[in-house]
Image: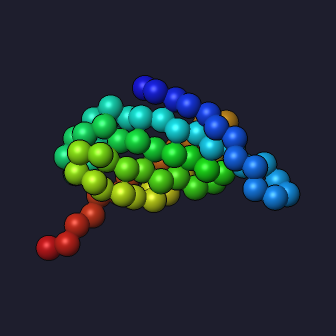
Amino acid sequence: MRHDTHSATPAPETVTVQDLRLPNGCILCGGDLAVRFTGATAASYCPRCNWLSHPPVRREDGNVFMTQPAGGVA
């Protein structure tokens, strides 16, 4: 798992940005999933199938939980 930390500085507070890559994390095609955590939100992108998502994130006891809900259109 790859993990990078960046710091963006919007006025007047500082927001921490963390990037990570989840191997085989895309629920659509099984490709590597790039995830960016910014504050209490997340955005994910799969370069193989171009799926972009904003998965729900919750923090609990120092851990971060991200959910990729499966859904589709019939």
Total numbered labels: 0
The N terminus lies in quadrant: top left
When asked about the image quadrant of residue 69, the answer is bottom left
The C terminus lies in quadrant: bottom left
When asked about the image quadrant of residue 72, the answer is bottom left
The percent position of residue 10, horizontal first and vertical second, equals: 76, 56
Residue at 30% x, 56% y: name it.
51
2 in relation to 72, above or below: above
Name the residue nearer the viewer: 5 or 59: 5
65 in relation to 72, above or below: above
Which residue lies most toward the bottom here? 74
* Left-right relation of 73 to 59: left
* Left-right relation of 54 to 58: left
Name the residue nearer the viewer: 22 or 13: 13
Which residue lies most toward the top here? 1
* Left-right relation of 34 to 64: left
* Left-right relation of 58 to 72: right
Residue at 36% x, 57% y: name it.
52
Which residue lies most toward the right here? 12
The percent position of residue 29, horizontal first and vertical second, equals: 19, 46
Which residue lies most toward the left here? 74
Q: Is residue 73 visible?
A: yes
Q: Is residue 58 visible?
A: no
